[in-house]
Image: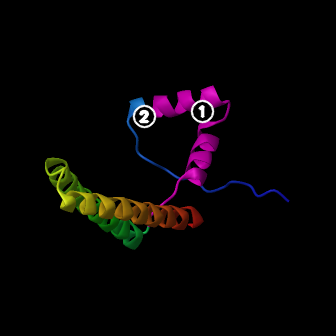
Amino acid sequence: MAQHRTVMVAARVTPAEHAAWRAKAAAAGVSPSALLREAMARTHTWTASARAVERERTRQIARIGNNLNQLVRWANTHRTAAEAVSVIAHLVSFERALLRVARIAEEADDAR
């Protein structure tokens, strides 16, 4: 047996937003209510703790990127030095490890 939709949800929007939603619904061939239900069903929401973890992860990746840029700049400045070869080898190793971590994080996000 189909459930009847009896609960109304109200949201304050500008006249321009309202017109845009109505236009999108018309273009999709659905009612504005159906459009909003579909959009909400596709929306991924974050808990406060998950948002904080993501923010910290982004900060850490930015710091790592800054450090890598400094190392690459140094290696490019000292290209002929034997130390540069060692640094570049470590950078390649580090890049591979970072890609593994990114892949694991992406898989964890997809699992949610």
Kindly identify the residue that appears in the image at 81 percent across and 56 percent down. Answer: 2
**Spot occupied by residue 26 in the image (x, y as percentages of width and height):** 61, 27
Check disc 1 and report its element: helix, strand or loop. Answer: helix
Kindly identify the residue that appears in the image at 14 percent across and 48 percent down. Answer: 77
Q: Which secondary structure is most common in the magenta stretch?
A: helix
Q: Which residue is denoted by mark 2 in the rendering?
A: 17
Q: Is 12 situated left or right of 33 in this image? A: left
Q: Which residue is denoted by mark 1 in the rendering?
A: 25
Q: Nearer the viewer, residue 5 or 84?
A: 84
Q: Which residues are magenta?
A: 17-46
Give the amino acid at mark 1.
Ala
**Colour scheme of this structure image?**
rainbow
On the rendered image, what quadrant is the C terminus found in? bottom right
**Spot occupied by residue 8 in the image (x, y as percentages of width and height):** 57, 53
Q: Is 33 situated left or right of 85 in this image? A: right
CA separation in Å, label 1 and label 2: 12 Å
